[in-house]
Image: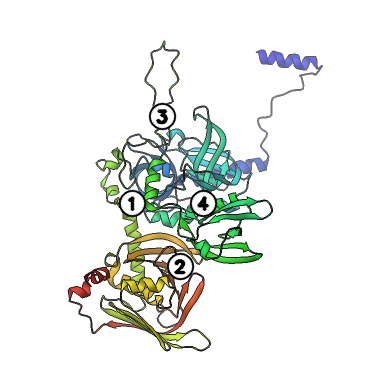
């Protein structure tokens, strides 16, 4: 009544008549563009919502959100959402169903985790968008489980714009680093963490993580951050590996020079970047195909890349532009990562205050809103898993328990074993000589690829390897021989790469040595990302890189020392009758080819000198050398 009197007085004092005012015409329709925009928004929400996941930690220790990315139930969320659950959690979808879920892999540095929902192979999945094309002002929406309100499994939808792109959020120590992330004013609250940020068409742009609050973490101030889907795609192979994975470092520090851009201020001489020519004062121009003009931009790019990737880099040194490949190092040592991962977990969620008497007017209001921050356990095992009801195993259903395998350095060894078996089976199916037995010898003949070709003969046997190139010859019989050949950059290191290839086919991963699926990475800085199998034998580390679609082995890398270049065998295939036989063997160190061979023949036959029944013949290579 007061407002109406004030309104009439105001208009009366202005001498305006009010008789001309009439209520709006209820029959009037909205303009067509407005109605269409509303319909498009509703359709985008309907398209996106089925792939959004509500994550609940058994025992009421927290929860959050996630998003499905494959029909067989693999979903992305935050590391800090899955931490209190350990290995097992419960997840709900907007279809009204609850699903068991297990941890797959975690990236504690980038605050990412992969889980798998169980029980179906036709889960609804998010359409992947292009976060690299996102721009400030683009409409976006967040769908998730703020304050764990989705008890009816219907997620909350908030709408806003992208306030910024390419934002950098400093880590807590060296973990929980948000690089090149998306900033949005769409309302994000505790419980949205791990959930999807979609574009206006319902395509996945990123994984929601941090948000800014005021007033005792109760009020969202309109600043939220999402890990870009580009970064998540870089790490998908690593997360599928079931490992606890790390991020990359260039091995150098930089600063922004107003006149010279991104300038190197310090560099490790043991780094691959130093071996490729990067020096103090070098100006870095481009990393992984992205131009950089400030130190912040460089860190933004590096923060989205897994450890051990080999990427393209361009820099200027002494007035000359250098374009090369650099193998990035790990930010942490393995034990250091596990230790910091445990120490960096967020504090326990707030607990409701004890109930107060009605006349206790001076009592503080209770902080009883749910939170997605995990409860800090009192003790942790070497794997980094929390000890609690969800982790003890007693309440985990059999369908989930059989998909959980503890292994040091792994979030879940079960999934690594699946991937290891898959890649090894691909290698066996595409062996150049069919099935290889332990006593079989590879014999390869060809010619060097040069103006005056030289004949080449190669013999790869269980106890020794030999190479003849024209009038030169080399023979390797011990682990020390293999190590020295790689360390010195000698052409005889070709024998080491071929020997590792033959052994994984003949012996299998169990007898080869510690073998596991590492993840996916570029080959020579190029995508698609290749599957990478890693095996440890004696003092060397071997990596087999295969094409993700065909399974074809494209490169074998053998490391003797992380501070020197590995021996790299690049394989090229031609139009020969047997498509599994490489047409060209190219041995490289760093960016230089040291021996290139055109293959004429590749055969396999039992070694007449080997006694397959003797203990010595069936012993591992390391056992033989120990015995000698």
Q: Examine the rendered structure and indicate whether residue 284 appears above or below residue 5.
A: below
**SS label for mark 4:** loop
The crowd level at tag 3 (other Cα within 10 Å; few <14, some 14-19, many 20+) is some
Q: Residue furthest right?
A: 15
| Alpha carbon separation for disc pair 1 and 3 | 29 Å
Q: Which sits earlier in the primary sequence, circle 4 or circle 2?
A: 4
Q: Which mark is in front, 1 or 4? A: 4
Contact check, label 1 and label 4, Cβ < 8 Å = no
Q: Earlier in the sequence, mark 3 or mark 4?
A: 4
Mark 4 highlights which residue?
Answer: 303
Q: Which mark is residue 565?
A: 2
Viewer-side label of 1, 2? 2
Please tell me which residue lies in front, 532 or 596: 596
Query: Which quadrant of the figure has residue 384?
Result: top left
| 3D distance between C-alphas at marks 3 and 4 | 31 Å
Where 223 sits versus 485, above or below? Answer: above
Residue 412, numbered circle: 1
> Closer to the N terminus: mark 1 or mark 2?
1
How is the protein colored in the picture?
rainbow
Q: In x, y percent, where is residue 346? A: 42, 37
């Amino acid at each position: 009544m007061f407002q109406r009197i004030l309104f009439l007085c105001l208009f009366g004092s202005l001498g305006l008549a009010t008789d001309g005012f009439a209520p709006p015409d209820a029959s009037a329709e909205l303009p067509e563009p407005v109605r269409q925009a509303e319909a498009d928004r509703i359709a985008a929400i309907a398209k996106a919502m089925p792939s959004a996941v509500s994550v609940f930690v058994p025992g009421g220790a927290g929860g959050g959100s996630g998003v499905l990315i494959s029909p067989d139930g693999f979903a992305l969320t935050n590391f800090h959402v899955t931490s209190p659950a350990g290995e097992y959690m419960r997840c709900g979808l907007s279809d009204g169903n609850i699903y068991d879920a297990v941890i797959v892999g975690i990236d504690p540095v980038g605050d990412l985790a992969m889980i798998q929902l169980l029980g179906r192979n036709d889960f609804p999945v998010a359409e992947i968008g292009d976060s690299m094309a996102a721009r400030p002002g683009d409409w976006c929406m967040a769908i998730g489980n703020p304050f764990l309100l989705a008890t009816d499994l219907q997620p909350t939808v908030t709408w806003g714009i992208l306030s910024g792109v390419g934002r950098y959020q400093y880590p807590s120590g060296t973990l929980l680093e948000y690089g090149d992330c998306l900033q949005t004013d769409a309302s994000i609250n505790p419980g949205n963490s791990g959930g999807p940020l979609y574009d206006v068409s319902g395509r996945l742009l990123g994984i929601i993580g941090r948000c800014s609050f005021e007033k005792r973490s109760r009020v969202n101030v309109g600043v939220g951050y999402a890990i870009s889907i580009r970064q998540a795609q870089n790490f998908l192979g690593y997360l599928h590996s079931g490992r606890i994975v790390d991020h990359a470092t260039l091995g150098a520090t930089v600063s922004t020079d107003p006149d010279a851009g991104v300038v190197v201020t310090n560099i490790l001489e043991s780094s691959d970047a130093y071996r490729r020519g990067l020096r103090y004062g070098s100006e870095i121009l481009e990393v992984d195909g992205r131009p950089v003009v400030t130190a912040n931009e460089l860190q933004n790019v590096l923060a989205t890349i897994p450890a051990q990737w080999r990427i393209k880099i361009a820099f200027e040194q002494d007035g000359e532009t250098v374009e090369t490949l650099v193998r990035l190092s790990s930010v942490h040592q393995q034990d250091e990562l596990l230790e910091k991962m445990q120490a960096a977990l967020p504090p326990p969620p707030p607990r409701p205050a004890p109930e107060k008497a009605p006349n206790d007017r001076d009592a503080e209001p209770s902080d009883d809103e749910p939170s997605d921050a995990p409860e800090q356990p009192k003790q942790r095992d070497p794997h980094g898993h929390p000890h609690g009801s969800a982790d003890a195993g007693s309440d985990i259903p059999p369908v989930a328990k059989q998909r959980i395998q503890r292994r040091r350095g792994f979030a879940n060894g079960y999934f690594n074993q699946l991937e290891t078996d898959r890649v090894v089976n691909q290698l066996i199916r595409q062996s150049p000589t069919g099935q290889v037995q332990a006593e079989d010898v590879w014999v390869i003949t060809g010619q060097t690829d040069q103006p005056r070709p030289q004949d080449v003969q190669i013999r790869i046997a269980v106890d020794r390897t030999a190479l003849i190139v024209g009038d030169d010859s080399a023979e390797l019989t011990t682990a020390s021989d293999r190590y020295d050949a790689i360390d010195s950059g000698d052409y005889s290191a070709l024998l080491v790469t071929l020997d590792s290839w033959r052994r994984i086919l003949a012996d299998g991963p169990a007898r080869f040595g510690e073998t596991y699926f590492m993840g996916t990475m570029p080959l020579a800085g190029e995508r698609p990302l290749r599957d990478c199998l890693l095996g440890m034998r004696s003092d060397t580390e071997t990596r087999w890189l295969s094409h993700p679609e065909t399974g074809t082995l494209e490169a074998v890398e053998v490391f003797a020392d992380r501070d020197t270049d590995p021996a790299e065998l690049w394989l090229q295939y031609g139009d020969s009758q047997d498509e599994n036989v490489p047409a060209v063997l190219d041995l490289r160190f760093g960016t230089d080819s040291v021996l290139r061979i055109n293959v004429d023949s590749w055969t396999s036959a039992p070694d007449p000198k080997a006694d397959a029944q003797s203990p010595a013949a069936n012993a591992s290579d390391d056992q033989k050398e120990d015995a000698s």
